[in-house]
Image (cartoon, grey):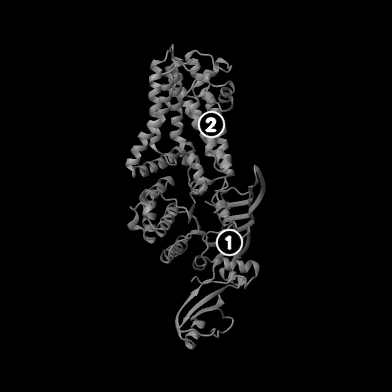
Amino acid sequence: MLVEGVRAYGLIAGMWLRAGMTYRASFAATLVGNLVMTGLDFVAILLMFSQVDSLGGWSLPEVALLYGLSVTSFGIADLVLGSMDVLGARMRDGSFDTLLVRPAPVLAQVGADRFAPRRLGRIVQGAVVLGWALVSVDVDWSVPKVLLVPVMVVSGAAIFSAVFVAGAAFQIFAQDAAEVQNAFTYGGTTLLQYPPSVFGKDLVRGATFLVPLAFVNWVPVCHLLGRPYPVGLPPWVSFASPLVAVACCVPAGLAWRAALRAYRSTGS
Amino acid sequence: MDTNGRVGAVDPFIELDGVEKVFEVRRKTGFMRRERHRVRAVDSISFAVARGEMVGYIGPNGAGKSTTIKMLTGILTPSAGRLRVAGIEPSRERTRLAHRIGVVFGQRTTLWWDLPLIDSYRLMHRMYRIPDARYRENLDRLVELLELGSLLDVPVRQLSLGQRMRGDIVAALLHDPEVLYLDEPTIGLDVVSKAKVREFLRQLNAERATTVLLTTHDLQDIEQLCSRVMVIDHGRLVYDGALAGLHESGESERTLVVDLARELPPIDAPPPARVVRVEGPRQWLAFPASESAAGLVARIAAEYPLVDLSVREPDIEAVIAKMLHGDSHGKEVGRPVP
């Protein structure tokens, strides 16, 4: 099933790449545009630090670490599953039906839909900031702490992916609600670019326990920097991100399956 | 392969038993107030289609045709009843079923808009894991039959509607499906394209014994292709049998339109043919669809100054409406378009 999905994903993404290449100029322009657009978020943070020395008690390299992790993780999830927002359009015009009669997992087909390498822009930009943050930040590096970095990126990507899939399932139930999904995905990654200490306790609690986005970077980064997490948590959770990722992906997958069974199609 | 689906001599390739589909519809009835009600799109339908049959599935808009097709292909999950295609429960094993069925949605293409036609076929080749030799052979045969050879390198967006429809049919058949579902395969096509598509489907059914189930608004599709017709109305199967029988139970009429050399009083036609409309030198005569027009035409030609003529088929809605309501005068049959 997973192998089939990856294979189908590759086939369809390849078709979209080729289709995209028929408009070369647009292809290049959107790639550059995406790099610049997503980079503006970090420019905003730099502007703030030109006026203040710390944000919620966090220095620039520390915030950059949060930013780099959030954007890179989200970028990977967005590259793989970011087409979920065209799902609504596909359901409205009825073309979602045509995906359901193919011998390939629907999630792979939807994920690969409108695949565009311009989404690499976000990952590149996040990785650059992350790289700079890792060498600038004041951390007493040890082997577990070094290992924690790639674990964070992968777990974070998985947590965001789960949110994308759950959002897609919700779109099918609610007959197009891309904005609700965007609030959690694009809204989530923006939230995580800032230290938890600048937000209200309730918001941090929500992002920790309700939609556990905090495990993408906040919780493990607090461990790296030796900071207390604003919401009381046992110390071992610093390494719990992979578990949280699995705990998110399983219900998201089940919700997606339930949504496909409940799919209503259009009138014709 | 398919041992459990075989019952005696007949092979019920497609089997529906008491299949229902109920939609819950929420309607806005005021500010923040919504009323829920249930719509029974398909209401306890049962039928069986044998391997190699070619069946027309017709009915007015919103009767439940598409909903049935979507349940047969696994797109929708039935609310109740039992449904099997090739022994498979479609909504549970959609992926396994996909290898054995072909689907053409008349109004939405599955071809890649910006890429040459051949690229869409290459994707099918790999996605369906069609063995290379079989793919080549099928592609060559289908492309030749549907006259697409010169168009394989043309981007799909540059194809005409008729060419695209033929392209879609090829895409649906490359993996040798045992059953082909066609949803309005001739909608919007010109006469030549329609003829090509029909001729192709006839051959496919005759030579490959592919089971074909098609929905259409075009009575000629049914007349030229299907030995069996199923009529659905308000989610219920109201007729299942030969097309001739449908005409009988609907007492449908064809219309002969004649242009005379000058204005004349209504033609004295032999019953049951009768003049239903006169407009200057043009007259409209209704006659039973089951009868040949030849006798009537010969008689008029002999007695009147005939300049031109045409025969109009009854449209499917009119036939069904008559059958359903036994209303032979409520709607003008085969009303000519000026």
Q: Is residue A140 visible?
A: yes
Percent position (x, y) of residue B309? 46, 78
| Number of marks in picture | 2
Regarding mark 1 in the picture, which secondary structure is present there?
A: loop
Residue closest to the eye, B15 or A37? A37
Percent position (x, y) of residue B156? 38, 52
Chain under label 1?
Answer: B
Regarding mark 2 in the picture, which secondary structure is present there?
A: helix
Percent position (x, y) of residue A251? 57, 33
- Please determine whether, in this image, residue B33 is positioned above or below residue B276: above
Q: Amino acid at mark 2?
A: Cys
Taking the view exactly as shown, the residue that stands out farthest to the front is A51
Q: Is residue B3 visible?
A: no
Q: Quadrant of the C terminus of chain A?
A: bottom right
Whole-angstrom CA distance, mark 2 to mark 1, is: 44 Å
- Please determine whether, in this image, residue B229 is positioned above or below residue A10: below
Residues tagged 2 and 1 counted as in contact (Cβ below 8 A): no
Q: Which mark is residue B309?
A: none
Mark 2 vs mark 1, foreground winner is 1
Taking the view exactly as shown, the residue that stands out farthest to the top is A140
Percent position (x, y) of residue A234? 58, 16
The image quarter in which residue B195 lies: bottom left
For mark 1, does the 10 Å Cα neighbourhood hold few (<14), some (14 to 19), or many (20 or more) residues?
some
Q: To which residue does mark 1 refer?
A: B60
Residue closest to the eye, A232 or B293? A232
Q: To which residue does mark 2 refer?
A: A249
The image quarter in which residue B252 lies: bottom right
For mark 2, does the 10 Å Cα neighbourhood hold few (<14), some (14 to 19), or many (20 or more) residues?
many
Q: Say left or right for A222 vs B113.
A: right
Chain under label 2?
Answer: A
Residue closest to the eye, A169 or A118? A118
Q: Amino acid at mark 1?
A: Pro
